[in-house]
Image: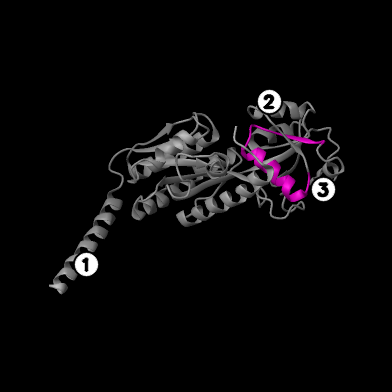
Amino acid sequence: MKLKAACVATLAVGSILTTGAVVAQNYPTRPVRVIVPFVPGGSTDIIGRTVSQKLSEAWGQPVVVDNRGGGATIMGTEIVAKAAPDGYTLLIASASFTTKLNLVENLPYDTLADFTPITLINTTPLVLVVPPDSPVKSVKDLIALAKSKPGKMNFGSSGMGGSNHLSGELFNALAGTKIVHVPYKGNTPALTDLMGGRLDLIFNGATAVLPMVKAGKLRALAVTSKHRAGAAPDLPTLDESGLKGFESVAFNGMVAPAKTPRDIIAKINADAVKGINSAETRERLKVDGSDPVGSTPEQFASFIKEEITKWARIIKLADIKAE
């Protein structure tokens, strides 16, 4: 009887594994929803639509982008956290996915436990810029000037806890400076005040500032990525400019609800990475100043954990509270 029971158990397990493989092989059999936790038109929305279109072409099924802006990305993210783990509801995660955990109390989801990473789609460096008439010509100049007048210089951002704010606080931490943060309601007013000389510096996306740099309205000092950016290969990184270990990038990635079958995650990953590496998608990302990635789920999981750890330290050090 024991032998018979063991055989039945073995057959049951084999049946489950076979069923899982068949489900993954046939997936998807109906439309897939991709939640973008922002209003339409932004960079995350554009990238989410680009990758979704590639998946739709690969699968022969509609992959529909559902914009759920609100709650500073929390609302859309919660929808995916609580969705069925069947591969039919996915999320385009951005940098706020890794910072909300330490910025907002009582999140309605667990960033690490409630999601399964699929792939890191792209990273986008920020550019450190100063007014064109600033006496600062390099990162070394900036650090020296800031140290000579602690608390007297300022940097702008589009709001508390965003990538450009956290980049400035990381700069302070690594350079030993006390440059004061000035939050704005969006990038445009911050850039206007920077060009007008009412701010000393700002960290901002390449797409927004590089045209201004070329027009002589701003001066670029460095990029925030670990390696030089494809959009501005002549600009040094902050790491090579003396701030060893400096790395701050905006990013977009794809995640699914926790407990989504591994075979389905593998299928989505393979087809998403193929789409990310297509010439069309790479060109689309280049236009936005982004570098395509297309990682494995394991690599993206490690990236998420590293980002959470890094920004938790900076958020605590700078005593940042979400607005």
Type of amino acid under label 1: Thr
Which of discs 1 and 2 lies nearer the camera? The answer is 1
Q: Position of residue 275 (x, y in %)?
A: 45, 46
Which residue is tagged 3? 140
- Mark 1 and 2 residues: CB-CB less than 8 Å, in contact? no
Q: Which quadrant of the figure contains the C terminus?
A: top right
Q: Earlier in the sequence, mark 3 or mark 2?
A: 3
Q: Is residue 168 magenta?
A: yes
Which residue is tagged 1? 10
Q: Position of residue 54 (x, y in %)?
A: 42, 42
Q: Which residue sits at x=67%, y=50%?
A: 228
Which of discs 1 and 3 lies nearer the camera? The answer is 1
Type of amino acid under label 3: Lys
Which region of the structure is painted magenta? 152-177
Q: Which quadrant of the figure contains the N terminus?
A: bottom left
Tell me the element at label 3.
helix
